[in-house]
Image: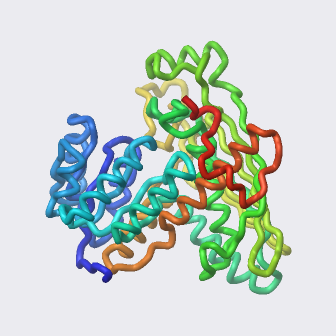
Amino acid sequence: MAVKRDRLRVGFVGSGFIAHFHLKSMVGVRNVDVTGVYSRSAEKRRRFSDAVTELGMGTCRTHDTLESLLAADDVDAIWILSPNDTRLGVMRALHAAVKAGGSKIFAVACEKPLARTVAEAREMVRLVEDAGLNHGYLENQVFATPVLRGKEIVWRRAASTTGRPYLARAAEEHSGPHEPWFWQGDRQGGGVLSDMMCHSVEVARHLLTEPGAKRGSLKVKAVNGTVANLKWTRPHYAEQLKKRFGAGVDYRNRPAEDFARGTVELEDEAGNELMIEATTSWAYVGAGLRIQLELLGPEYAMEFNSLATGLKVFMSRAVTGSEGEDLVEKQNAEQGLMPVLEDEAGVYGYTDENRHMVECFRKGETPLETFHDGLAVVEILMGLYMSSELGRTVRFPEPELEHYVPVVARR
């Protein structure tokens, strides 16, 4: 039976960069309070709780164990925002607490990617459904404001008269992640392909899916992937990583890919052939994070570039100051002509994503993106990794993907 609430009380598992991004976006979401947080660092938990108070998002209690957060009587749903190698463990703990009657939580949302392998992702789905929880997959680019508006216009005005779109291109690039675990193949589950192409393939799949159609209306036929180490294995940059993150990030001997390219062949319900082209990189040095999206059809095209902003500022050499990311995420300079994203949380999709999840959980409805979509994404990613390892196209269904582990994630 669906649980309904006037307000949703959310607990965060994780208190790092992405947790703060989600928190800031929730200022634009109604009917929600952030009432709890658990992470391994007491100092980060305290800073997160203080940020909740400062933003007026409720009274957030800090929990020194995951079990304490799951048993709290003031938490209805949790957002899993901890590192990739912890997410299955969090889900197992939540499943056990709910099944034993020790938790009142009735919904869970998980940040991308859902898991590191197909087997892990399938177990996440099994656990959440066995526990009877409502569930959402946090893929922000599906809810990005240009994606929402662009898809609506294309399908309503162009596809309806000249035919469905057939090609989606998605690229995401920046200069590298914030935390050391992202760079560690075994903990993260791979390199940039796992970290960022999960965005690209899902936003492209979403753009190609007819509004109102079932999420599985597009069938994956085959994938072809390429990975490379372009920048961070060079001695100078490998040494930079070691100095920045410690000996645990050793790109001389244990690198993960910093470039990935993938093509995904799909088929719609009418048998039409569709294509996704995706490119991701940790080796892009520009103004900051760049997201490039395109959707092409018989008589139309849509495109978006996150750095082609309406607002720009120029600062001469005389303007000096500390490094920061106050203009755009992964900002690489403090001088010159620079784009500014006035509302990163909105443009990137976090605000509408969290609004959607909160309302679905609060009303007992199924979100647009669920753990099933997270599983579908991981299947594509593992297919791309396998393709790059074997040097050939991988055709679906591929039974070997179930327990496949990317080369850089093997211990």
Q: Nearer the viewer, residue 173 or 203?
A: 203
Residue 299 percent coordinates (x, y): 84, 74
Residue 196 percent coordinates (x, y): 59, 46
Of the 4 image quadrants, the one containing the N terminus is bottom left
Query: Residue pushed farthest bottom?
Result: 161
Residue 138 percent coordinates (x, y): 46, 59
40 left or right, relative to 351: left
- Asked if one can make out residue 315 in the rendered structure from this viewpoint, the answer is no
Q: Nearer the viewer, residue 33 or 287?
A: 33
229 left or right, relative to 184: right
379 left or right, relative to 395: left
- Asked if one can make out residue 192 in the rendered structure from this viewpoint, the answer is yes
Q: Nearer the viewer, residue 401 or 343?
A: 401
Q: Residue at x 27, y 72 (%)?
A: 31
Q: Nearer the viewer, residue 137 or 396?
A: 396
Q: Above or below — where is 317 with respect to 174?
A: above
Q: Residue at x 40, y 61 (%)?
A: 127
Of the 4 image quadrants, the one containing the C terminus is top right
Q: Residue at x 23, y 41 (%)?
A: 45
Q: Above or below — where is 256 with respect to 91?
A: above
Q: Residue at x 78, y 49 (%)?
A: 224
Q: Above or below — where is 1 with respect to 222?
A: below
Residue 272 percent coordinates (x, y): 82, 75
